[in-house]
Image (cartoon, rainbow, N blue to C red):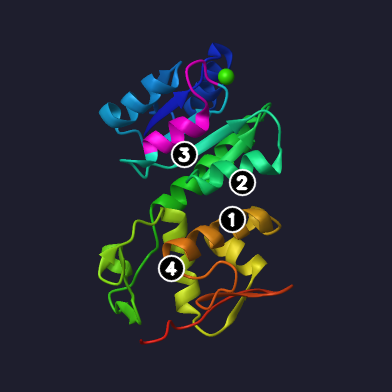
Amino acid sequence: MKVLVVEDDPGIIEVVSLCFQLRWSGTTIVSASSGGKGVELVESESPDVVILDIGLPDMDGYQVLREIRRFSDVPVIMLTVRSEDTNIAKGLEMGADDYITKPFSHIELIARVQAVLRRAQGVSVSDEEHPYASGKLSVDFSRNEVSLDGKPVKLTSTERKLLYHLIRNEGRILSHESLLSKVWGETYIDARDLLRVHIQHLRTKLGDNSESPTIIVTEHGMGYKFVRPANN
Ligand code: CA
């Protein structure tokens, strides 16, 4: 596995390297102490996962993330200092896969990395899985292809997995806990804000109305329900 750490604090790079070496002894660590260098290395090194600090000397982590997302859907875990919801939501809205707050334990870091790698591997789709099509939306999970009105829609691996479970349960309410555990894992069952942000993102990409959604419907106090898009 190859990991890119974008962080200007050598102490943190060392801690992260050590965590990875302990858990995955063959890990290659590549590091960048500036955002610009980090973006370059995502392109030239094709890492399996990126650990991205928000406080960097040349640009902030959000800008770096925006640059990375222009050309790559590599899993990105953001490092934050404070656990402010606004910061977390901002990163997730921009396509981060998860975040971790400094100081962190190595167990926490490894757990987060394992979870994003599992999600990045995508959904296990059986051969009998037929492509889904209704209204303007068509989805082929076995080919990882989603399109809206014939135009390709780029989903992150997390969004794809979320959509998969929603569609598989079309017309049925999926509880927050059930979606969180299916997509993120058991340890995330209370992370409703995380789910809400990704649902909003998915709605936008699928052309659903975020004020009064008709495709991914909010069932207050319960969860979410996927409703077959109308054929018109
Ligand atoms: Ca820093």
**SS for callout 3:** strand
Q: What numbered label is drawn on residue 207?
A: 4
In the figure, residue 190 lies in which quadrant? bottom right
Residue name at image x 44 percent, y 22 percent: 35
Residue name at image x 57 percent, y 23 percent: 55
Q: Is residue 88 visible?
A: yes
Q: Residue furthest top?
A: 10
**SS for callout 4:** loop
How crowded pointer 4 is (Cα within 10 Å; few <14, some 14-19, many 20+) is rated as: some
CA distance separating discs 4 and 3: 25 Å
Q: Is residue 67 magenta?
A: yes
Q: What numbered label is drawn on residue 76?
A: 3
Cβ–Cβ under 8 Å for marks 4 and 1: no
192 on left or right of 49: right
- Magenta segment main secondary structure: helix
Cβ–Cβ under 8 Å for marks 2 and 1: yes
Q: Ligand 1 is in which quadrant of the figure?
A: top right
Of mark 3 and mark 2, the one earlier in the sequence is: 3
CA distance separating discs 4 and 1: 16 Å
CA distance separating discs 2 and 4: 21 Å
Camera-side mark, 2 or 4 = 4
Q: Residue furthest right?
A: 221
* Residue at which label 2 appears: 89
| Whole-percent x, y for residue 206 in the image | 42, 67
Of mark 1 and mark 3, the one earlier in the sequence is: 3
Q: What numbered label is drawn on residue 197?
A: 1
Residues rendered magenta in the picture: 56-68
Asked if 124 appears above or below 168 in the picture, the reply is above
Q: Is residue 24 visible?
A: no
Mark 2: C-beta under 8 Å from nearest atom of ligand 1: no
